[in-house]
Image: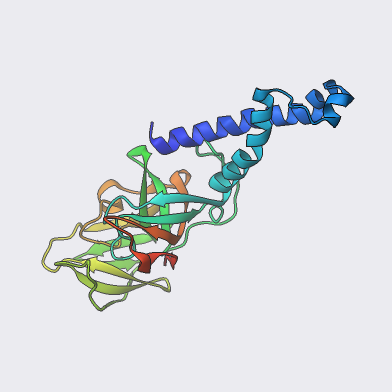
Amino acid sequence: MSFVVVFNLVLTVLTAVTGLVWLADRLWLRKRRSADAVEREAAPGPVVDFCVSLFPVIFAVFVLRSFVVEPFRIPSGSMIPTLHVGDFILVNKFDYGLRCPVGSCKFLRVGEPQRGDVVVFKFPEQPSVDFIKRVIGVPGDHIQYVDKMLTINGQRIDIAPAPPGDEDGFAQRFEENLAGVHHNILMIPGQPSKDVDERVPDGEYFMMGDNRDGSNDSRYWGFVPEQNLKGKAIMIWMSWDHGPAFSRFGKLIR
């Protein structure tokens, strides 16, 4: 069980326990204390006082993390040049619907991922591990990736040479226009590509990294089920690998 899963479970339990104590204090325990003790604001007991004091903070964190935004740290270079190792990002957990804090059940459907979205999801082969990639294909799409050229539903996706960056190395940078989402990708000239010719099943998505020749993605292990999606990456709030990269702080993800 991963740290994130354990943390979410502990946070859920703490919220439930402190919330029950807080509710009991408001509805029952206070009434049992004498009017004189209430007037003097006597402490209701260390355990009850601790839970009552902690509950608002725990509840706020629980709601924000479970249903609004969740922090995520980029662990690999599969999304270079869009995201770097050490980027700390915020993931919008509302756009694709509200899910149970523990598990993958969805209780409110809001929207669906679109081509070009950068998404955090549970790795299908190891659900305790979170991956981040870009949505290339949505349900029903016919995806072809042959000789480093991407075609969706028979339409070739436009790419154009882009100015190189410091992190490119032997790779060449291109600007890709994916359903109106303009972003940079990296490809290594002469390196063989993993070719695919697939139709995306209902309820699943085809994901690829922007570092096309350095990404372990749907070309290798298949599609991502809808229930594995965690949220849409929206912003880099901090970047720290061997030191701070201030130019990346507050950068929107597209």
* Residue sticking out furthest to the front: 40
Task: Report the quarter where the C terminus lies.
Answer: bottom left
Q: Position of residue 106 (x, y in %)?
A: 56, 43
**Residue shown at 30% from the left, 62% from the top:** 210
Q: Is residue 238 left or right of residue 215?
A: right
Q: Nearer the viewer, residue 204 or 48?
A: 48
Q: Position of residue 146 (x, y in %)?
A: 22, 64
Residue 31, located in which quarter of the rendered image? top right
Q: Position of residue 35 (x, y in %)?
A: 89, 25
Task: Say whether residue 199 is visible.
Answer: no
Q: Nearer the viewer, residue 100 or 177?
A: 100
**Residue shown at 29% from the left, 55% from the top:** 241
Q: Nearer the viewer, residue 57 or 215?
A: 57
Task: Say whether residue 86 is visible.
Answer: yes
* Residue sticking out furthest to the right: 35
The vertical placement of 59 against 154, above or below, is above
Task: Report the quarter where the N terminus lies.
Answer: top left
Residue 134, located in which quarter of the rendered image? bottom left
Q: Is residue 158 left or right of residue 17?
A: left
Number of numbered markers? 0
